[in-house]
Amino acid sequence: MLEDLGTIFIASALINNFVFSRYLGLCIFFGVSKKMETAVGMSMTFTAVMVISAALSWLVYNLVMLPAGLGFLKIVVFIGIVAGFVQGADTVLKKINPTLYHKLGIYLVLITTNCIILAVPVISSDEKYNFMQAITLGLGSGAGFSLALIIMASIRERLELANVPKPFQGMPIAFIVTGLIALAFLGFSGLITV
Amino acid sequence: MDTPAKTPKDVSAGDARLRASVGPHISSGESVEHIMWTVSAALLPAAALSVYYFGVHSLLVMAVSIGSAVAFEALAQRMAGQKVAVSDGSGFLTGLLLAMNLPAGVPLYLPVVGSAVAIIITKQLFGGLGFNIFNPALIGRAFLLASWPRYMTTWPVPHDSLSLASVDATTAATPLAILKEEGYARLLEHFASRYDMYTQMILGHRGGALGEVSAIALLFGAAYLLYKGYITWHIPVSFIFTVGALTWIFGGDPVLAVFSGGLILGAFFMATDYVTAPMLKKGQVAFGVGCGALTVLIRLKGGYPEGVCYAILLMNCFTPLLDRAFRPSKFGAAGAKVKV
């Protein structure tokens, strides 16, 4: 059981890293990785939202939708759950903890439409994960995305000083860096046979 | 004389003597050029042995790889409007290291493609020497391995004597591949005794890439670089020690682990790259330990028999973070929290 959860965690964080091997969530990945500070803030917010929305989606899918035979509606429902939850968290946070809201508020809005947040519930329903497995998948995906963001931010801060040819400055070189990191992440392939 | 007075801008742009480079400003008589050519020379014993074992085709692979690397570097520097500086030897060294990572029997267009990826994409797009994030030769190898996995894992058997014939048609799995597919006991059967296996590993009579066949020839070159102070012990020792120790802990044969595969080549000649490894000693030790741990992880659990190349590339991703984490406190600011 525990070994199984460990496998899911490592697989979702490293081997099937959402950014470097599934190429999902790239809009936030490129948008927020310019500075280390924002990357760290985004990582924490993202992981928290990921775990909670994975849990919520699992509950709704397995306790309401499957018994009612509404499994085919899952994509629409998952989008609704994530958007509703994030919007709710946004409002509540603004009211009870304005300091934290000030720090994390902008990230919350960005996360609502992120594809990884949608991919996690879809994968866990496809794989017929149980509750703990679904949460572990969310945690692993969050950790993998945080790892990607923080590596990328540190590299991009170093690239600020690099003598990159003009046409490649900014986004183009960021895409090239991502491709090269993905090449390095190939080393993890086959690490765990799921 | 009636020449117009120079504005400060002219001075800074025109007169190289008045431009200050980044510190430290200690004159040692060493130059990038000198170091690059010395490192290339330190690879010569291993290169010569590979020609001895794999025949002339090995020499061809090296020539094509080096030639195309230098040509691509000149082309890219010209296109970027930089001064063409191929004589600094960095393109030459990248080409040589790439060839060292290829099997002897590859078709000759592979080193050309590998050099293009290494020089143009990995190095020049980032601004050239000193700005690349990843080790160019290793990215070249990883790209080739992903694109032509069959050519990149077909290892010709080493000859017993110098032969002018092309590469043998017979191929053999590398010791690490046998270890992965069939286990330690089967690997031992290929040799007369355990002692015999170790000597063959160290002298280099085994399947493998050009540069990884002979540990002793590589160590000879590495010792010279250490003696000259061009590389320090921090990365290679922590890298190799971690591989040996972790392999031993997980029940493997540490001597075999250290002398097989590309570990010696990677630890001394590629992980120590000034540009892509951390600058500070503590960071370098952490880098070496990380490389070692990832190598063992990939060797024991991963899909590939050898993990040195990917381990170094993965740790290259972490180099800016390591430099950040071990940033020393400012002089006089000890104890004060320096915000990073």
Image (cartoon, coloured by chain):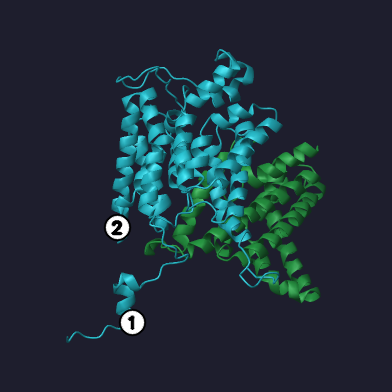
Chain colours: A green, B cyan
x, y (%) of residue A140? Answer: 70, 48
Q: Earlier in the sequence, mark 1 or mark 2?
A: 1
As shown in the figure, which amino acid type bears the numbered disc 2? Met
The image's mark for residue B79 is 2
**Which chain does tag 1 point to?**
B
* Secondary element at tag 2: helix
Left or right: where does residue B220 sit relative to residue A115? left
In the displayed structure, B163 sits above or below B142; it is above
Left or right: where does residue A143 sit relative to residue B23? right
x, y (%) of residue B9? Answer: 33, 80
| Residue pictured at 44% horizontal, 25% vertical | B154
The image's mark for residue A119 is none
As shown in the figure, which amino acid type bears the numbered disc 1? Pro
Along the viewing direction, whichever of A160 and A34 lies nearer the viewer: A160
**Residue at numbered disc 1:** B8
Along the viewing direction, whichever of B60 and A152 lies nearer the viewer: B60
Q: CA distance from mark 1 to mark 2?
A: 30 Å
Does residue B116 show up? Answer: no
x, y (%) of residue B217? Answer: 44, 31
* Secondary element at tag 1: helix
In the displayed structure, B144 sits above or below A65; it is above
